[in-house]
Amino acid sequence: MSVQNLTYLFVGITFALYITIAIRSRAGSTSEFYIAGKGVHPIANGMATAADWMSAASFISMAGIISFMGRDGSVYLMGWTGGYVLLALLLAPYLRKFGQFTVPDFIGTRYYSSVARLVAVICLIVVSFTYVSGQMRGVGIVFSRFLEVDINTGVMIGMGIVFFYAVLGGMKGITYTQVAQYCVLIFAYLVPAVFISILITGNPIPQFGFGDQVIDDPQFLLSKLDGVMTQLGFEPYTSGIKSTIDVFCITAALMLGTAGLPHVIVRFFTVPDVAAARKSAGYALIFIAILYTTAPAVASFARLNLFESTHNVSYEMLPSGLKIGKI
Amino acid sequence: MNKSEENRHQYWSSNLKLVFSLLLIWFSVSFGFGILLVDYLDQFTFFGFKLGFWFAQQGSIYIFVILIFVYIHRMKKLDEKFKNLSTEDD
C-alpha cells in the first residue's frame, strides 16, 4: 500500500472516530451544549484541555522554531506552560466557584454591569477571532498537504468538519472528541521522537536523550551541536542571540496571553466542582508537559541531523525545503 | 467579627499565602533560572545539559507541573480544615 493510501486510511479512521464520538455524546440540553452538563471527569477534562490548548502551533511548528532559534526558543516553552500556571492558580478555581457559563457572564454578574459584560464580549471576540485565524491557517496547511489541494480549500474543508461536530455535539461532544484527539496527537508526536532519540543517542526517552552522548562518539549531543554550529560561524545552539530583556518580555507576554485564552478558561466550567477544576488544571499541565518537554529534544535532534545530512552534499541534491526561494 | 467570618478571613489569607509562595517559585525557575541567571548557571553541567539551558527548556516545565499539584493538595487540605471548622460553628 502506498504512503498516500496509508495516510488516507489513518486520517479516515481518526475522523470516523471523532465523528462517532461526537454523535454518541451529542448534547441534549443547554447546559450540556455549553459546559457538558458539568459532568466531565478531571482526567478526561485535563486531556481535553491539553488537546484544546496545544494548538496547531504547538503540534506543527514549535519544535521547528526551537530548532531554528536554539536557546532563544525557550520563550515558547516557558511562556506557554508558565502562563498555564497563572491560569490554574489565579483564574480557573475562582471562575469555577462563581458558576456561570462564560467569562463575560462572570464579569457581568460580578460587577453588576452590562457595560462591563459587553466589553468582555468584545474582548472575547477579538481574542478568539485572532486565535482562530491562526489555527485555521494551520488546519488549512495540514489539509492542503494531505489532500493536495489549495490552502484556502483546505481551510474550508477543515472548517466544515469542525462545524459539523461542534454544532452537533456541543461542549460535551467536543470534550470527548478532544480526549480522543489528545491520544492521537501525543502518540503521533512521541513515536517519531522516541525512535529518533534511539537512533541518535541510544536513549529511548527523548527528554533525557538530548542531554546524552551521541552514539559512536564520546561527545554529548548538545556540546557536539554547539561545536558544529561554532565551526560553521553560527552562535552555539545553547546560547541565545536575543538580549535578556527581549527574552524576558516575550516570555511575560506569552504567559499573560496564555492565561487569558477563552476556549481554555471555559474548559474549567465543565467539571463538577472547584476541587475538580483545580485537579483538571493539574492533569492538563501533565498532558501538555509531555509534549512540551519532548519538543526541545526533537528540536536539537533535528538541528544536528540537518548539519550531518547536508554535510558535503551538493546544492542540487538537497531536499527542496532547504533551497532558497522554495517553500 | 464573628467566628464564621473570622474563619473565612483565615481561609482567604492562607489561600493568598499559598498562591503567593507558589508564584514566587514559578517566577524564580522561569524568569530567574531560565532567563536572568541563565548564563551564570550555564557554567554548571547537569546530566549533560548546561544547567541554565536545562532550566529554560526542561526544568521549568517539570517544576510548573509540581507547583500545580502542590497547589491542588494544599487547597484540598485547606478546604477540609475549614469545612470542619464551619460545621463546628453550626
Image (cartoon, coloured by chain):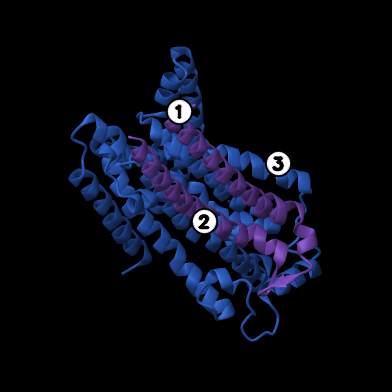
Residue B85, image x and y in percent? 40, 41
Q: Nearer the viewer, mark 1 or mark 3?
A: 1
Residue drawn at the location 73% of the way across and 72% of the way down = B45
The colour one sees for chain B in the rendered image is purple
Q: Find the distance from the CA under tag 3 to the CA under tag 2.
A: 23 Å
Q: Chain of mark 2?
A: B
Element assignment for label 3: helix
Q: Amino acid at mark 3?
A: Cys
Q: Determine whether A318 is above or below A26 in the image.
A: below
Element assignment for label 2: helix
**Closer-to-camera residue (B40/A17):** B40
The colour one sees for chain A in the rendered image is blue
* Residue A159 in view here: yes
Residue drawn at the location 76% of the way across and 49% of the way down = A242
Q: Which mark is residue A105?
A: none
Identify the residue position indicated by label 1 in the image. B2
Q: Determine whether A211 is above or below B68 in the image.
A: below
* Residue A67 in view here: no
Q: Which mark is residue B65?
A: 2
Q: Amino acid at mark 1?
A: Asn
Identify the residue position indicated by label 3 in the image. A249
Query: Could you tell me if the residues under marks 1 and 3 are in contact, i.e. CB atoms within 8 Å?
Result: no
Residue drawn at the location 37% of the way across and 42% of the way down = B83
Query: Could you tell me if the residues under marks 2 and 1 are in contact, i.e. CB atoms within 8 Å?
Result: no
Q: Nearer the viewer, mark 2 or mark 1?
A: 1
Q: Find the distance from the CA under tag 1 to the CA under tag 3.
A: 46 Å
Q: Determine whether A67 is above or below A171 in the image.
A: below
